[in-house]
Image (cartoon, rainbow, N blue to C red):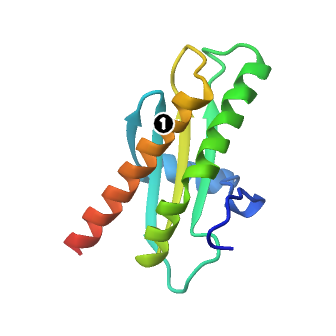
């Protein structure tokens, strides 16, 4: 499974309880146009899916569901292709992470812009994990 560019059902953050916990207890940062919420915890054994993600696009800026769904597809695709370095760091440090991306711009972004923002966001998550592991 390692090394594949998939985004299976098991890698999606769908539980309302888990999402609520992420927003209440997790941390956040912004990488325009994305707002990134994340929560990490240690896992006792190597979990098959240590990284779960969710996406959201607000109806305030995009009235049409077609536009919201397009932005969500672009974010999921960017995550799918850029997630492997973060996944390796999580496995190396025996951590699991829930991450949620909220699109927070009023204008539609093209795939290249979202991919670049996603890459920056995932790089920042890797840096945060590495920094936290050095302090422990």
In the figure, is residue 22 to the left or right of 127? right
In the image, residue 103 sits, relative to residue 29, either above or below, namely: above
In the image, residue 53 sits, relative to residue 45, either above or below, namely: above
Image coordinates of residue 13 in percent, x first then y, are: 65, 54
Image coordinates of residue 52 in percent, x first then y, are: 61, 59
Image coordinates of residue 16 in percent, x first then y, are: 67, 50
Residue sticking out furthest to the left: 135
Q: Which residue is rendered at x = 47% and y = 61% of the image?
A: 86
Residue beneath disc 1:
116
Quadrant of res 61: top right
User: In the rendered image, which quarter contains the N terminus?
Assistant: bottom right
Q: Residues within 10 Å of mark 1 (few under 14, many from 20)?
A: some
In the figure, is residue 7 to the left or right of 94? right
Q: Which residue is rendered at x = 54% and y = 86% of the image?
A: 45
In the image, residue 73 sits, relative to residue 135, either above or below, namely: above
Residue sticking out furthest to the bottom: 45
User: In the rendered image, which quarter contains the C terminus?
Assistant: bottom left
In the image, residue 36 sits, relative to residue 15, either above or below, namely: above
Quadrant of res 5: bottom right
């Amino acid at each position: 499974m390692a090394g594949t560019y998939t985004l299976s059902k098991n890698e999606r953050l769908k539980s309302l309880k888990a999402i609520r916990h992420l927003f209440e207890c997790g941390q956040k940062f912004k990488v325009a146009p994305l707002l990134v919420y994340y929560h990490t915890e240690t896992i006792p054994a190597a979990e098959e899916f240590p990284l779960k993600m969710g996406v959201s696009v607000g109806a305030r800026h995009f009235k049409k569901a077609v536009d919201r769904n397009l932005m969500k597809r672009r974010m999921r695709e960017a995550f799918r292709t850029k997630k492997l370095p973060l996944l390796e760091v999580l496995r190396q440090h025996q951590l699991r992470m829930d991450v949620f991306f909220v699109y927070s711009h009023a204008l539609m972004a093209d795939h290249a812009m979202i991919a670049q923002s996603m890459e920056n966001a995932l790089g920042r998550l890797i840096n945060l994990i590495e920094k936290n592991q050095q302090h422990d």
